[in-house]
Image (spheres, grey):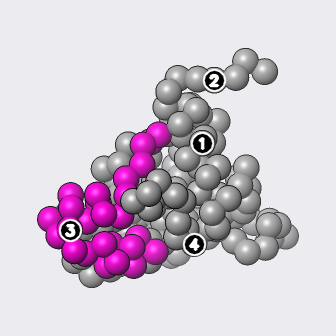
Amino acid sequence: MEQEQYFYQSPIGVLRLANEADALAELSFQQEDMLPDNNPHPAAPILVACIRQLDDYFSGENLSFDLPLAQPGTAFQQKVWNGLLAIPAGRTCSYMDLSKKLGDPKAIRAVGTANGKNNIAIVVPCHRVIGSNGSLVGYAGELWRKQWLLAHEAKYSAGVQTLF
């Protein structure tokens, strides 16, 4: 199956989804906050599943994703991205904590660099990594989105939902 792309309108802007065969290869924020004129619903089952899971995520119904991923990278980058997948929704982890969990407390900058090379935003939750002092730092999707995603997850992971 050839690669498809789809532009998803989210509460925090337009997201570009792309597949590689039967796996999600990209979920990225778009600079232009407009859907393209030609945005047919995708045929690729992985993109259809991703859209459904994004709908559930943004509605607060389900904050976790279960999608096959295709993200090329070095062995270290893969290790970091797998570490990101282990951070539960509604929780955060510092770059230092993540480097310690990965077995190399001196690799803080390398962890940050690998985190920044993540091509599958939200699903591979690089937004859950914060500075050691608790500050929101280093997010390619802009810090306001990181703040929104963390607040959204905190709201729904704690079981707090608005009635109206």
Per the image, the residue denoted by label 4 is 140
Which residue corresponds to the image point at 47% horizontal and 54% vertical from the top-left? 134
Q: Position of residue 12 (x, y in %)?
A: 71, 55
Please report the residue visible at 44 percent of the width from the left and 62 percent of the height from the top. Answer: 131
Q: Which mark is residue 105?
A: 3
- Front-most of residues 51 and 14: 14
Alpha-carbon span between mark 4 and mark 1: 18 Å
Relative placement, left or right, of 58 versus 26 is: right
Between 148 and 131, the one lying in front of the other is 131
| Amino acid found under the numbered disc labelled 3 | Pro
* Type of amino acid under label 2: Gln
Q: Which is nearer the eye, 92 or 76? A: 92
- The residue that label 1 is drawn on is 151
Q: Position of residue 111 (x, y in %)?
A: 33, 72
Do tag 4 and tag 1 residues touch (Cβ < 8 Å)?
A: no
Where is 129 relative to 115, above or below?
Answer: above
Highlighted range, magenta: 89-116
Q: Earlier in the sequence, mark 2 or mark 4?
A: 4
**Badge 4 density bin: few <14, some 14–19, many ≥20, Cα 10 Å:** some
